[in-house]
Amino acid sequence: MACIFCRIVAGEIPAKKVLETDAALAFEDLAPQAPTHVLVIPKRHVESVGGLGDEDAALSGKLLLAARDVARAKKLTDFRVVANSGAGAGQSVFHLHLHVLGGRPFDWPPG
Ligand code: 5GP
Ligand code: ZN
C-alpha cells in the first residue's frame, strides 16, 4: 500500500491518534504549523476534496463533525479548518485530509 495515510489507518505507520469514528481518523500532524495541528482523514481512501463524489455527502459531513470534535477535545473556541486540494493548492499527501489548526492567531487572507 503506497498511500501514507492509508498505512496510518491500517496501523502500519504510527500516529498520535486524537479521535476515531466509524468513518474518520484524527491524528497529530508530524510537522505542526500551530500549537494544535490535527489532521482529520476518511478511513477510506479519497484523493482530495476534488475527488469526492456526490455519493460521499455523508462522509463529508462526518469529516466536518470530526473536525468539530477535535476542536472540542482540544478546547479550542477559535480554530481554522483547511483542506488543500491539488498540488498547486499545497496538497502534498494525496489522501483527503482536513487540517484543524488552533492556539495562535491566523492571517486572512492566507498566504
Ligand atoms: P498537505 O500539504 O497535503 O495539505 O498536508 C499534508 C500534511 O501531512 C502536512 O502537514 C505534513 O506535515 C503531514 N504529514 C506528512 N506525512 C505525515 C506522517 O507520516 N504522519 C503525520 N502524522 N503527518 C504527516
Ligand atoms: Zn490513502
Image: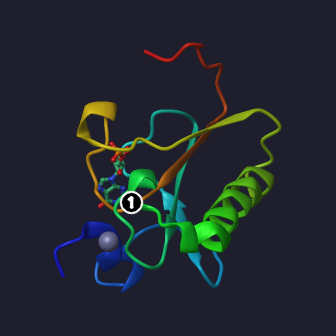
The one of 15 and 84 positioned closer to us in this rendering = 84
Residue 47, compared with residue 111, is above or below; it is: below
Q: Quadrant of residue 59?
A: bottom right
Determine which residue is flagged by label 1.
51
Residue 108 percent coordinates (x, y):
60, 13
Residue shown at 48%/67% (left/top)? 53
Residue shown at 30%/43% (left/top)? 86
The one of 89 and 32 positioned closer to us in this rendering = 89
Residue 42 percent coordinates (x, y):
50, 71
Report the amino acid beneath label 1. Gly
Relative to 57, 29 lies left or right: left
Number of other residues with Cα within 10 Å of mark 1, as a class: few under 14, some 14 to 19, many 20 or more: some
Relative to 1, 52 lies left or right: right
| Visible residue check, residue 18 | no
Residue 80, compared with residue 4, is above or below; it is: above
Residue shown at 39%/59% (left/top)? 51
Residue 59, compared with residue 74, is above or below; it is: below
Residue 69 percent coordinates (x, y):
76, 60
Residue shown at 41%/69% (left/top)? 15
In what quadrant of the picture does the C terminus appear? top left
Residue 81 percent coordinates (x, y):
61, 41
Q: Quadrant of residue 58?
A: bottom right
Relative to 6, 71 lies left or right: right
The one of 80 and 13 positioned closer to us in this rendering = 80
The CB of the residue at mark 1 lies under 8 Å from ligand 2: no
| Visible residue check, residue 84 | yes
